[in-house]
Image (cartoon, rainbow, N blue to C red):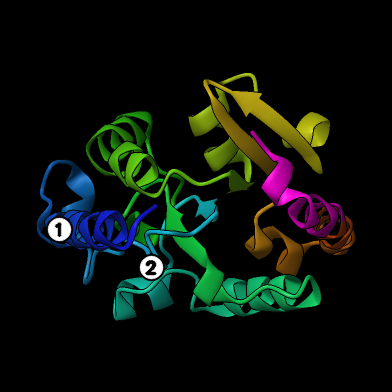
Amino acid sequence: MTKDELRTSSEQLENLASGIRRCVACRLHESRRHAVPGEGPASAGIVLLGEGPGGKEDATGRPFVGPAGRYLDKLLENQGLTRKRLFITNCVKCRPPENRTPRRDELKTCTSLWLERQLELISPKLIVLLGQVAARQMLGDTATLSDWHGKRVSHNGRNYFVTYHPAAALRFDWVADTIRADFDVLGKLLARLADLP
């Protein structure tokens, strides 16, 4: 990507973020404080994709800044990664009321209006799916974490890596053990990232 192309992609990504902050296309805008477009460079080779913003994210407008985000930062740090190299976002850009699971129509609206356009602009080599909602949204309703976690999956011309959501690791010891092992696999995969198609 040339400097001009990168500048154009960065500007387009920021324009999308501005649109997300003003979005009223689904019911989630009714209770939000701040929409959370995501953050990271347009040149990111890796996108981390979660379910939706939580309370801290809704308060700040930034992704993964609460307890799950701090846990995620440690997982990344253990693999020699920092947020500066990644784009981090969610399937839905506004916090669902009382942290409920996003509804199918909300996911469809956010994905078609915003997420797909973000992914097209960034064109990452790998999308890390954090949790069941992200996995099913990107890979289809039959995607299950128990079968696919810790694995690279190619689907519709994109490369994905599936793992559990960091919030689940804070609640269940077995998930914490599993997600650490998954991130070890991810670290090895990222070492070969340049070889990914």
* Quarter in which the C terminus is drawn: top right
The numbered mark, 2 or 1, whose residue comes first in the sequence reads 1
Residue identifier under label 2: 39
Q: Nearer the viewer, residue 82 or 73?
A: 82
* Main SS of residues in magenta: helix
Magenta-highlighted residues: 185-197
Image vertical order of residue 9 relative to residue 82, above or below: above
SS class, disc 1: helix
SS class, disc 2: loop
Q: Position of residue 41 (x, y in %)?
A: 40, 66
Image vertical order of residue 24 relative to residue 94, above or below: above
Q: Nearer the viewer, residue 8 or 141?
A: 8
| Residue 163 can be seen, yes or no | no
Q: Position of residue 14 (x, y in %)?
A: 21, 63
The amino acid type, in three-letter code, at marker 2 is: Glu
Label 2: few (<14), some (14–19) or many (≥20) C-alpha neighbours in 10 Å: some
Image check: 32 left or right of 136? left
The amino acid type, in three-letter code, at marker 1 is: Asn
Q: Position of residue 96 (x, y in %)?
A: 35, 54
Q: Which mark is residue 97?
A: none
Residue displayed at 30% across by 30% down: 105
Q: Is the Cβ of the residue at disc 2 closer than 8 Å to that at disc 1?
A: no
Residue identifier under label 1: 15
Q: Position of residue 50 (x, y in %)?
A: 52, 53
Label 1: few (<14), some (14–19) or many (≥20) C-alpha neighbours in 10 Å: few
| Residue 78 can be seen, yes or no | yes
Is residue 126 found inside the magenta-colored segment of the image?
Answer: no
Residue displayed at 74% across by 36% down: 152
Q: CA distance from mark 2 to mark 1?
A: 13 Å
